[in-house]
Amino acid sequence: MRLVRDPLLWLIALFIALLYTMPHTEGLFSWLFPELVRPVYQQESFSALALAHLTLVGISSVVAIVIGMGLGIAVTRPWGLEFRSLVETITAAGQTFPPVAVLAIAVPVMGFGQQPAIIALVLYGLLPVVQGTLAGIGAVPEATREIAFGAGMSRWQVLRKVELPLAAPVILAGIRTSVIINIGTATIASTVGANTLGSPIIIGLSGFNTAYVIQGAILVALAAIVTDRLFERLQSYITRYAK
């Protein structure tokens, strides 16, 4: 009974249901936009677009997490402290460049498709992960580290068994922000030939078809909300575990 009342399950069910029922809502969108000849996006199935969208976000997020956490951990080690300001400056600069500009630079080199989109999303997703890693490890009490060293742990063991577990809730908050940003930003990948839920939005904007824009925007928004709720559950679990 508790599962039935779970709002997260209802959100997931709603998202999946919309993927398969959206192509059959021509009557609704014809009523809302009677001037449109084709009020429902039909070029590709919404389920295929959603799968491609989430795959693109997943790949770019994993790369951003690995690089971001690696950089964040490296500059908190004694040998990497002098590079901290440089890393923070470079990752912050990555978000100052509009994704469209990154795509414009990457496409002539890499061609159309997913690859330039992944580069843009990784650059955009790095900053929250780096900041979360720095804040999480920085919040670990120095006394806790000293106790761990006193117990005979090596620096690697202190990082793996003490610092990262205690910093996990804050690091996860940064990852959560990064992934949610990428879900929204991935919509522009359709401008360079990648299949995403942004395809109906881009085609709708270029063809003055508001119905297409609404259909794509609803699904992207729901995907972001569902992902955010999933991270909320995971963060709550890890926070309890860390305590």
Image: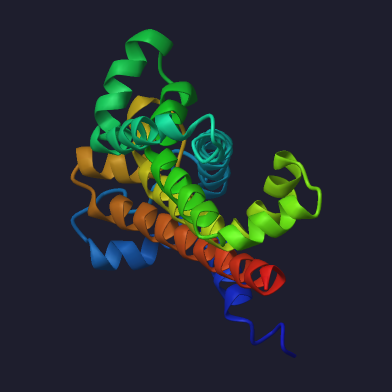
Who is closer to the viewer here, 42 or 105?
105
**Number of numbered discs:** 0
User: At 70% across and 55% down in the image, what residue appears?
Assistant: 162
Q: Residue at x 22, y 43 (%)?
A: 205
Given residues 51 and 224, the one toward you in this image is: 224
User: x, y (%) of residue 164?
Assistant: 65, 52
Query: Residue most toward the top?
Result: 109
Judge whether 123 appears above or below 197 on screen. Answer: above
Q: Residue at x 32, y 24 (%)?
A: 103
Residue farthest toward the right in the current orientation of the protein = 152
4 above or below 122? Answer: below
Q: Tell me the residue at 58%/63% (across/down).
A: 169
Quadrant where the C terminus is found in the figure:
bottom right
76 sits left or right of 144 in the view: left
Left or right: 173, with 101 as reference point: right
Q: Is residue 24 visible?
A: no
Q: Is residue 119 visible?
A: yes
Is the residue 18 above or below the residue 69 in the image? below
The image's colour scheme reads rainbow
Image quadrant occupied by the N terminus: bottom right
Up-down relation of residue 9 to residue 27 (above or below): below
Could you tell me residue 15's position as x and y percent? Answer: 53, 64
Q: Position of residue 100 (x, y in %)?
A: 27, 31
Q: Looking at the image, which residue sits at the far bottom?
A: 1
Q: Residue 202 location in percent, x, y?
A: 29, 40
